[in-house]
Image (spheres, helix red, strand yellow):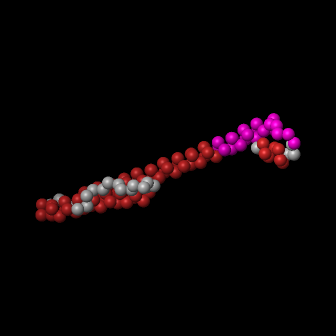
Amino acid sequence: FYFVYYVYLGHTRWEEPSSMSSMWSGFTFILGFLVVFRTQSAYGRYWEGVTLLRQARGEWFNAYSSLLAFCNHEKPFRSRVEKFQHLLARLMSILNCTALQTIADMEDTNFPTLDTT
């Protein structure tokens, strides 16, 4: 600001003008406003993403629960049904892990899953 005052306004002495404090306070206000605005919008985007991720996880849980509820519970099919249910649990675990890996911004994205063997 001193440079602008010195060069463009044609002053020959380097002195702090009385209007310099108002220029500085205006600059500080605008800078503070921009920082607060950007921080607030980033915070809002973060919480929107968290909410959508929780919603997707809830939908997957509902789908998994529905598939388990509609399984056949008769004795002759019990071993095949249990095998299907265990496979389904592992696949849902992998689905959740893949979703977290997609949005993760970390070097180590090895999220735990159920054993697939």
Is residue 76 visible from the viewing direction of this image? Answer: yes
Residue 41 image position (x, y, % from top left): 56, 48
Position of residue 30 in the picture relative to residue 76 (left or right): right
Residue 51 image position (x, y, % from top left): 44, 50
Question: Quadrant of the image for the N terminus?
Answer: top right
Residue 23 image position (x, y, % from top left): 76, 41
Position of residue 58 in the picture relative to residue 88 (left or right): right
> Does 113 sit above or below residue 2?
below
Position of residue 106 in the picture relative to residue 24 (left or right): left
From the viewer's side, name the closer residue of 55 and 16.
Answer: 16
Which region of the structure is painted magenta?
12-33
Q: Residue at x 64, y 46 (%)?
A: 34
Quadrant position of residue 83: bottom left
Residue 104 image position (x, y, % from top left): 43, 55
Question: Quadrant of the image for the C terminus?
Answer: bottom left
From the viewer's side, name the closer residue of 109 and 54.
Answer: 109
Query: Does the magenta run of residues contain 14?
Result: yes
Q: Residue at x 47, y 52 (%)?
A: 49
Quadrant position of residue 60: bottom left
- Dominant secondary structure of the residues highlighted in magenta in the image: helix
Q: Residue at x 23, y 59 (%)?
A: 86
Quadrant position of residue 96: bottom left
Query: Does the magenta run of residues contain 110?
Result: no
> Does 75 sit above or below residue 34?
below
